[in-house]
Each structure stands twice: as C-alpha cells, then as structure tokens.
C-alpha cells in the first residue's frame, strides 16, 4: 500500500514539473523593422542590403564644338590678261572659273585642253587657253599679263609681218624717251610713286571704277608711275583701248588705258616718270587716261600710293 502511494506521488511531481516548464517558456525575440539613425537606409524588398541603389554620376563633360574657321577668305585673281595669248601661267587667286572668264572661253574647253580633273590647278602651272594649232594674230604676244616674277632672258623675239627677228638684250634696254615731272613723289611699300599724268581727275576710284580717270588733251604725256618692266602693250582688252601694263615687283602693277599711242614695247624696262604713251580716247567717250594700280591682282585706290 505504501509502495503504491510513493509511485503515485512521483507521477504527480513529474506532472507539476512539466507544467512549470510550460509557464516559464521564454518569449520570442522582437523583430526590428528599421533604424532611425542618420546615414542608415531602410531595408525593403527591392534593396535587401540596406543601401541606396547605385546611380551613375551625370555626364558633365562639355559637348565638342569644332574651332571656328579663322582662315583668311579667298581672294580671286581678276587682273587683266592678253586674250590673244595661247597659254596662261597660274597665279595666286586663279581658278578655272576666273581664268575662263578673263580669256573669254568656256570652263569645259579649259578643262579639256589641259586634262584638268575636279578643277585642280597648281601655282606656276602653264595652261593652254587656246586650242591646239592656234596661231596668235600678227603683232600679238603669246604671253599673259597676270604678273609674275620678271624672267631674266637674254633676248626677246618680235614679229614683223611673217619674219621673226631676235634682238639681243632688248629685254633689259631702257628707252631714251624723255622723263616728265607730273608733281611730287611719294614712297609707299618700298616703291617711289608719282602721278601718271598732269591732268585733272575726272573719275575717282570706287564703286564701278577700278581706277582713276585723268583728263587732259590729246597727245598729252603719259608716264610710268614707278620704275618697272612693261609686261603688256597692246589693244586686245575690251574697254581699255591702247593699254600698257607695267610690273613693279611681285606685288604691284599699274595699268594705263585709252592711250592715243604706245611708246614702249613688252619686256622693256622703264623708269619712274619716263613717257610711255600719249593720252587719247581709244575705247573711251572722251580724251582721258584710265589708270589702275593693283596689289596681288586686286584693284587698289591709287590715292593710297600716289601724290594726288
């Protein structure tokens, strides 16, 4: 009987012990939903690592802008030429267009006669401006009047009727024509200049006038405005009548038009003040000297150079 009571008491103690364990069961640890401390990002389903998504920096490099073109503008060469010439030497500012225009030929012909591709021409290149077999009219020189460095030659060939005669050293002979004073002398760009005639000014430079028109009487002296070489003497240029062109250096030339008579020849060296022509009205409505001064082929105001 006592043994049964002891076993029963043991089972009761075991049950009490199990109940006590249930009552004192440790609660589950709380779950944190985030932190309010500065610099800590909130955890979300899209960002499980607790930091802000990476955003690449904006491209702050400036957009590329090509440098402005500061090259000097193109200046075409429209200096007078001898339209009876068979060839032309390419000068600065020459193009297929302005060469064709000055020689009164088509661009297609110029390209065809010289096998020109894509209008490419070079300084110093000699171009045909007349078709093969062309013969210049009697008394006409086979050279252009766009100026170049004077050629040092020992002879000049002249044509008389059908006989060609070579005169030694004629290209360096200075004419004995009289020297005429037309006023003061002015030094500009290393050249001493004087008026080409003593007449009054009828038309000044500007607008449609590429030079100055001097008035006077028929037969009045026309002189070289500066020393140089005669590179053209003839009447093959429309509007200029009897024309003389004197080259002073690689940069400057002067032109004397509408003359009554021409007293010099191509290739001849002349001095400043030397008479080269007489005033007239060829290709003009009145007696006058049409005078032009050109720098690199471009007309300039003569008043910048001459004592007016």
Image (cartoon, rainbow, N blue to C red):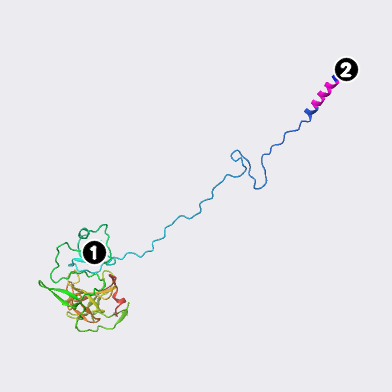
The percent position of residue 77, horizontal first and vertical second, equals 27, 67
- The boundaries of the magenta stretch are 9-19
Question: For the point 86% across and 21% down, which residue is it?
Answer: 9
Circle number at residue 3: 2
Depth check, front residue: 116 or 154: 154
- Specify the farthest residue to the right: 2
Q: Which residue is mark 1?
A: 99
Instruction: Looking at the image, tell me whether mark 1 or mark 2 is earlier in sequence order.
Output: 2
Is 42 positioned to the left or the right of 105 in the image? right
Is 24 positioned to the left or the right of 308 in the image? right
Is 91 positioned to the left or the right of 282 in the image? right
Q: CA distance from mark 1 to mark 2?
A: 144 Å
* Location of the N terminus (image quadrant): top right
The percent position of residue 225, horizontal first and vertical second, equals 25, 79
The percent position of residue 250, horizontal first and vertical second, equals 28, 73
The percent position of residue 33, horizontal first and vertical second, equals 67, 39
Question: For the point 87% across and 18% down, which residue is it?
Answer: 5
Q: Could you say whether the residue bearing mark 2 is in a helix, strand or loop?
A: helix
């Amino acid at each position: 009987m006592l043994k049964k009571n002891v076993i029963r008491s043991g089972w009761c103690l075991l049950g009490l012990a199990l109940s006590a364990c249930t009552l004192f069961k440790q609660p589950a640890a709380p779950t944190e939903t985030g932190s309010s401390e500065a610099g800590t990002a909130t955890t979300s389903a899209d960002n499980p690592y607790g930091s802000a998504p990476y955003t690449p920096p904006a491209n702050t490099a400036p957009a590329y802008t090509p440098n402005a073109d500061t090259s000097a503008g193109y200046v075409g060469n429209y200096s007078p030429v001898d339209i009876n010439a068979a060839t032309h030497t390419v000068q600065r500012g020459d193009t297929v267009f302005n060469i064709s225009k000055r020689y009164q030929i088509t661009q297609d012909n110029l390209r065809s006669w010289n096998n020109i591709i894509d209008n490419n021409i070079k300084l110093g290149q000699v171009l045909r401006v007349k078709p093969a077999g062309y013969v210049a009219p009697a008394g006409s020189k086979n050279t252009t009047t766009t100026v170049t460095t004077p050629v040092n030659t020992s002879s000049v060939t002249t044509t008389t009727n059908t006989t060609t005669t070579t005169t030694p050293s004629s290209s360096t002979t200075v004419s004995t024509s009289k020297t005429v004073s037309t006023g003061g002398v002015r030094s500009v760009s290393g050249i001493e200049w004087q008026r080409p005639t003593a007449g009054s000014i009828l038309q000044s430079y500007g607008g449609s006038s590429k030079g100055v028109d001097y008035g006077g009487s028929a037969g009045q002296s026309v002189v070289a405005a500066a020393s140089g070489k005669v590179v053209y003497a003839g009447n093959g240029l429309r509007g200029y009548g009897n024309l003389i062109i004197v080259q002073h250096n690689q940069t400057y030339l002067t032109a004397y038009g509408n003359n009554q008579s021409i007293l010099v020849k191509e290739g001849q060296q002349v001095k400043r003040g030397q008479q080269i022509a007489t005033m007239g009205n060829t290709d003009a409505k009145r007696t006058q000297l049409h005078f032009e001064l050109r720098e690199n082929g471009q007309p300039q105001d003569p008043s910048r150079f001459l004592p007016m």
